[in-house]
């Protein structure tokens, strides 16, 4: 932890409800310059929702999110753009534009937001792709490369404008162990060397403990545990222990009831119409 | 999504489109020519063969029906007038708009919808690239140029269809057909058709883009949005056509 560093992200009492269900229920934390914060937690615990609030693509029910000292929750689209130029985001699927080649994807933010010449941009693109081990892939289309490669292209696109802050949604899922180590090393170099700040949502505990300077575990919409990797490793909290060691039995419930998901926007329970017809032959 | 929200989204898209077209260029954010031309090729140039075939068939049909009715009055001489006026004022703009809706309206809705579903739109926003500026503006401008252009092209081909019937089935010679046709129409007939197709272009592309950008729920959502875009733009286009015809030709 670096208590002297400037505060980059300030999340204060963030609440987000979908109907009656609070997906985020009063979350507060700070991230300082040069830190790598890993957010972990089980599926559906609100990690991605939290991330979407931090990048300004979702508005909270109440509470505040400050990036670089500026409140983003009430911002208009145009004000938000100037903040967004200062951070990069790696999406879980890479989110490459399918109509552009790999090289065009990486150069897109450069063409849109800088006055660099085409030659300079080509050099930067080459260099950014080389960093993630994809030299010579400029002219392929996203549907011609694998999922892990897409993610690495997404990472080099997120880093194209040399952001001060990087958000990553599961940067290492779908990568082989060597590539995971390379991506982790890259994150470490950027945070240690260039004082970039990183916020990483991850399930991959090996990678999480390798890169984190601080960790947050989410559950039931609030923060279950927070601390340095050592503190988390030695946490007495049984939920934390179950999660970081990946044990099937423990205090974290396996089943999320439909009741809980009733008003969740993304997971709609459906009447099980199929069953009546599927087992029809048994009734006769 | 509630109807109120949908209308709000649609109006919002139109407003931000107006901003990016009329205000943004004066603040130094100029249009990029490349994407506009790419869209013009896919919306306009590639539709030309279909438009030609449709317009030719319509021209032939119109001439045959007109000949059939007018022959009993001994007024075959008016066949070119009827073909010319109907094409320029009504059938040209409407039928070519229908073709473009089926071809490009659906394609744009599906393309933007797929981009929305695969987080590409969100990625653009996070890179501080406005999706309206980057995706909608080139399509809009391309459509606004190409639909009237296709309409003029279709009018010509339709008139050619009428000529084919008059020349080979009736007792017209080419010069007679052309003279009659040109004499019957004045420039306003052409301009009214152009105004109509510019308005249709606006309707088609805004409905298609709005449907695409507001897709929810995966592949199924993309399908529904595409269908909705086609149905809504055909209905809106036909109703607008009736209104415009009444304003242009019935109010004086």
Image: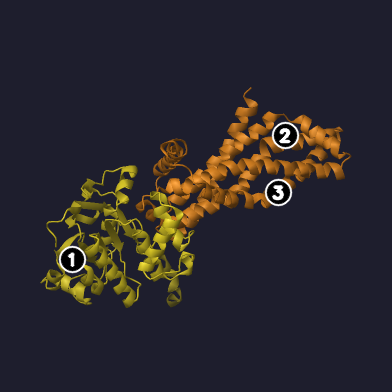
Chain colours: A yellow, B orange
Query: In the rendered view, does B44 fall on the left or right side of A258?
Result: right
Residue wearing tag 2: B85
Query: In the rendered view, does A280 fall on the left or right side of B174?
Result: left
CA gap between label 1 and label 2 equals 76 Å
Above or below, comparing residue B155 to residue A126 in the picture? above
> Splitting the image into 4 quarters, where does residue A26 fall?
bottom left
Q: Residue furthest left?
A: A236
**Chain letter behind tag 1:** A
Above or below, comparing residue B8 to residue A252 in the picture? above
Q: Identify the disc placed on residue B52.
A: 3
Q: Are marks 1 and 2 in contact (CB under 8 Å)?
A: no
Q: Residue furthest right?
A: B171
| The one of B200 and B66 positioned closer to us in this rendering | B200
Q: Are marks 2 and 3 in contact (CB under 8 Å)?
A: no
Residue at image coords 74%, 48%: B57
Q: Are marks 3 and 1 in contact (CB under 8 Å)?
A: no
């Amino acid at each position: 932890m670096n208590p002297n560093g400037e505060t980059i992200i300030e999340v204060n009492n963030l609440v987000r409800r979908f109907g009656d269900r609070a997906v985020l229920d009063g979350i507060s934390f700070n991230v300082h310059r040069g830190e790598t914060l890993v957010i972990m937690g089980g599926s559906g615990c609100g990690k991605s929702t939290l991330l979407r609030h931090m990048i300004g693509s979702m508005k909270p029910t109440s509470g505040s999110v400050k990036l670089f000292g500026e409140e983003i929750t009430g911002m208009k689209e145009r004000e938000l753009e100037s903040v967004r130029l200062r951070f990069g985001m790696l999406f879980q699927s890479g989110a490459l534009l399918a109509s552009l080649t790999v090289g065009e994807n990486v150069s897109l933010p450069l063409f849109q937001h800088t006055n660099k010449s085409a030659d300079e941009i080509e050099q930067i693109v080459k260099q950014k792709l080389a960093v993630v081990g994809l030299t010579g892939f400029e002219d392929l289309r996203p549907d011609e490369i694998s999922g892990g490669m897409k993610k690495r292209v997404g990472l080099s696109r997120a880093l194209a404008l040399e952001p001060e802050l990087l958000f990553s949604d599961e940067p290492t899922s779908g990568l082989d162990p060597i590539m995971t180590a390379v991506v982790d090393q890259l994150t470490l170099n950027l945070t240690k060397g260039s004082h970039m700040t990183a916020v990483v949502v991850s399930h991959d505990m090996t990678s999480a403990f390798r890169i984190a300077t601080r960790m947050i575990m989410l559950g039931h919409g609030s923060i279950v545990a927070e601390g340095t990797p050592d503190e988390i490793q030695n946490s007495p909290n049984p939920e934390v222990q179950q999660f970081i060691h990946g044990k099937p039995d423990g205090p974290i419930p396996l089943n999320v009831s439909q009741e809980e998901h009733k008003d969740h926007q993304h997971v709609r329970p459906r009447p099980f119409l199929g069953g009546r017809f599927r087992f029809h032959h048994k009734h006769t | 999504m509630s109807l109120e929200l949908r209308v709000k989204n649609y109006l919002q898209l139109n407003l931000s489109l107006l901003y990016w077209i009329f205000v943004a260029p004066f603040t130094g954010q100029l249009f990029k020519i490349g994407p506009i031309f790419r869209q013009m090729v896919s919306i306009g140039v590639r539709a030309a063969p279909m438009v030609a075939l449709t317009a030719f068939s319509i021209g032939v049909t119109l001439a045959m029906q007109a000949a059939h009715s007018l022959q009993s009055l001994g007024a075959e001489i008016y066949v070119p007038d009827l073909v010319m006026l109907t094409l320029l004022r009504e059938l040209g703009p409407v039928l070519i708009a229908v073709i473009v809706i089926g071809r490009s309206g659906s394609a744009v809705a599906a393309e933007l919808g797929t981009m929305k579903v695969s987080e590409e739109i969100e990625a653009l926003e996070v890179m501080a690239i406005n999706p309206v500026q980057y995706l909608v503006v080139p399509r809009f401008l391309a459509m606004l140029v190409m639909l009237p252009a296709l309409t003029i092209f279709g009018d010509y081909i339709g008139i050619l269809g009428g000529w084919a019937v008059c020349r080979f089935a009736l007792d017209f010679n080419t010069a007679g057909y052309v003279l009659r046709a040109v004499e019957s129409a004045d420039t306003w007939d052409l301009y009214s058709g152009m105004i109509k197709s510019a308005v249709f272009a606006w309707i088609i592309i805004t409905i298609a883009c709005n449907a695409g950008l507001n897709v929810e729920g995966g592949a199924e959502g993309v399908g529904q949005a595409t269908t909705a875009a086609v149905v809504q733009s055909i209905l809106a286009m036909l109703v607008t056509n009736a209104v415009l015809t009444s304003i242009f030709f019935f109010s004086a």
